[in-house]
Every structure is written in structure tokens, then in C-alpha cells.
């Protein structure tokens, strides 16, 4: 009887230990809370040269760039953007810089606000202006990348721009990219060659080959056309209203 009693006690004790050890509350201890466990609290840094290219157009052959990047978390970021072009045959260039606070308003779009600074020089003279920015950037349905903004200059002039592009994957490394660009202005700004209404429209196509995901040389074609009062101002200055150019460049990101 004593042996049976001891055996029963051993079995009950072993069963109790198994039940306790299998309890979810004791099987594993939850880690101490840390903000690092929250994915939207991680800081990201990203920089991309979307376009670094040479264009063959009307003998002036400009170098053109479009660079942007950000630092921040999923919801809140600081964005830097710059684009412009410099002529290789003349001492002339136009460039734009933006510093923006960006806030995610959904899975695919960020609203952005900040400042923009424009600088243009020709010969020994230069011109500059500052503008306030309100923009929207992200991915529209069917995977169109959209970047648009409204601008108010220090003189109260209002304008807006829109760029949309799409990636066509011919293979995993060979990718075509059609691009559409346009801009409008409420007031004319003669010193910047801008008329009221729709200023211009641009269509382009770039074919890149990703040697690595971070580095892709490309070739392409680009067409630009000034419209309305902006075209009239270009004609009055002896400039070109429409340009068709072949181009080559590199796209890279970090």
C-alpha cells in the first residue's frame, strides 16, 4: 500500500508540474517593453538620384539632375529634394532645393510642407526666390508614382507642378519608365519666364538596366513643350518653345 501511495503521489506531482510548465503565462516571459519593438519607431535614411543625365538637345547639351531623400520614421520624416539643369556650352543654370516635413496620411501617401529655394544664373547675373510648399507624394492606384506640389512665392505668386511615372518590368533587371510632367501658374512672373495658365508639358521614357538594385544606367528620350504665355515669353527672348532630346544617365540609391 505504501508503494502504491508513493507512486500515486509521484504521478500527481509530475502531472501538476507538466500543467504548470505548459501554462502560457509561465512558458515564456514577455520581453520588457521598448520603443525599439515598435516598427514605426525605427529611423530610416534614404537617398536616391532618380536622374543624373546628359541630354543632347539644340546644341546646348544640358546636364540634368533630380535627387531626393529622407530621414525619419514611418509617420514623420524630413525630406530633401533638388532638381535642375546646367548648360554645358554656356554659363547658365537653373536649380531648385526643397526642405520638407512629411507626414503619412495613409499606407501610400504622404502630405508634405516646407520651403523651396530657386536659383538661376546666366553669365554674371543671377536670380533667386523663396517659396512655401504644400505637396503630396506617394503611389496612386495601379502603381503610379506621383509627386505634386503647390507653391506660394514671397511675392504671393501661386503655382503648382505634377510629376507622374510608372515602372514597366520587361525583366527583373530591365525596366522602362514613362514619365509625365506639367506645371501651372496663377500669375505671370516675367523675370522667371513664367506666364499664367498651363506653363509646359513634358513626356519622357527611360530604359534602365539594374546592374545592382542600387545602380542602374539608362538611356531614353524626352520631349518638352512650353505653352501659352510661357511659350510667348520664350519666343520673345529667342529661346526654344519645344525640345526633343536623346539622353543617357544613371539612377542610383543608398
Image (spheres, rainbow, N blue to C red):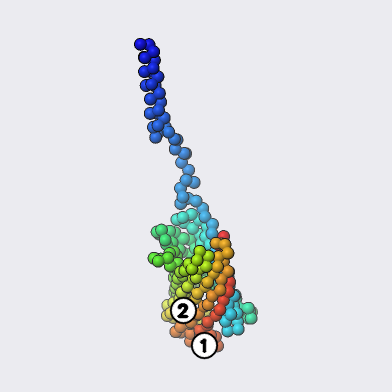
Element at badge 2? strand
Task: State how many labels appear.
Answer: 2
Q: How many neighbours does mark 1 have within 10 angstroms: few (below 14), some (14-19), or many (20 or more)?
A: few
Locate residue 248, reporting x and y percent. Answer: 58, 74
Locate residue 5, reporting x and y percent. Answer: 36, 14
Does residue 254 appear left or right of residue 6 in this picture?
A: right
Locate residue 219, reporting x and y percent. Answer: 56, 74
Q: Earlier in the sequence, mark 2 or mark 1?
A: 2
Report whether residue 90 is seen.
Answer: yes
Is 234 located above or below residue 158 in the figure? below
Q: Locate the N terminus and report the quarter of the image it occupies.
A: top left
- At 52% from the left and 60% from the top, the residue drawn is 70
Q: In which quarter of the view is residue 62 placed?
A: bottom right
Q: Locate the C terminus and report the quarter of the image it occupies.
A: bottom right
Element at badge 1? helix
Q: How many neighbours does mark 2 have within 10 angstroms: few (below 14), some (14-19), or many (20 or more)?
A: some
- At 54% from the left and 75% from the top, the residue drawn is 220
Is 89 located above or below residue 154 in the figure? below
Report whether residue 230 is seen.
Answer: no
Q: Residue 201: which numbered mark, if any?
A: 2
Mark 2 to mark 1: distance in Å? 17 Å
Q: In which quarter of the view is residue 94 placed?
A: bottom right
The answer to whether the residues at label 2 and label 1 have Cβ atoms under 8 Å apart is no
In the foreground, 156 or 131: 131
| Nearer to us: label 2 or label 1 | 2
In the foreground, 130 or 122: 122
- At 38% from the left and 28% from the top, the residue drawn is 19
Q: Residue 235: which numbered mark, if any?
A: 1
In the foreground, 39 or 183: 39
Amino acid at each position: 500500500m505504501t508503494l502504491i501511495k508513493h507512486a500515486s503521489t509521484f504521478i500527481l506531482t509530475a502531472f501538476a508540474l507538466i500543467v504548470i510548465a505548459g501554462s502560457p503565462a509561465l512558458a515564456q516571459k514577455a520581453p520588457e517593453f521598448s520603443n525599439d519593438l515598435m516598427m514605426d519607431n525605427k529611423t530610416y535614411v534614404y537617398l536616391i538620384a532618380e536622374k543624373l543625365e546628359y541630354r543632347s538637345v539644340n546644341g546646348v547639351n544640358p546636364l540634368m539632375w533630380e535627387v531626393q531623400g529622407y530621414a525619419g520614421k514611418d509617420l514623420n520624416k524630413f525630406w530633401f529634394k533638388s532638381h535642375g539643369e546646367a548648360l554645358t556650352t554656356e554659363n547658365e543654370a537653373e536649380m531648385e532645393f526643397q526642405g520638407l516635413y512629411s507626414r503619412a496620411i495613409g499606407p501610400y501617401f504622404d502630405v508634405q510642407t516646407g520651403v523651396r529655394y530657386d536659383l538661376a544664373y546666366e553669365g554674371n547675373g543671377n536670380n533667386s526666390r523663396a517659396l512655401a510648399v504644400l505637396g503630396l507624394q506617394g503611389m496612386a492606384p495601379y502603381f503610379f508614382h506621383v509627386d505634386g506640389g503647390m507653391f506660394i512665392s514671397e511675392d504671393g505668386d501661386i503655382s503648382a507642378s505634377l510629376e507622374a511615372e510608372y515602372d514597366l518590368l520587361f525583366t527583373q533587371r530591365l525596366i522602362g519608365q514613362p514619365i509625365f510632367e506639367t506645371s501651372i501658374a496663377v500669375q505671370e512672373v516675367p523675370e522667371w519666364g513664367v506666364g499664367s495658365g498651363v506653363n509646359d508639358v513634358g513626356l519622357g521614357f527611360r530604359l534602365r538596366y539594374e546592374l545592382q538594385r542600387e545602380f542602374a544606367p539608362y538611356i531614353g528620350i524626352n520631349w518638352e513643350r512650353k505653352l501659352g504665355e510661357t511659350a510667348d515669353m520664350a519666343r520673345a527672348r529667342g529661346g526654344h518653345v519645344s525640345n526633343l532630346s536623346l539622353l543617357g544617365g544613371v539612377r542610383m540609391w543608398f
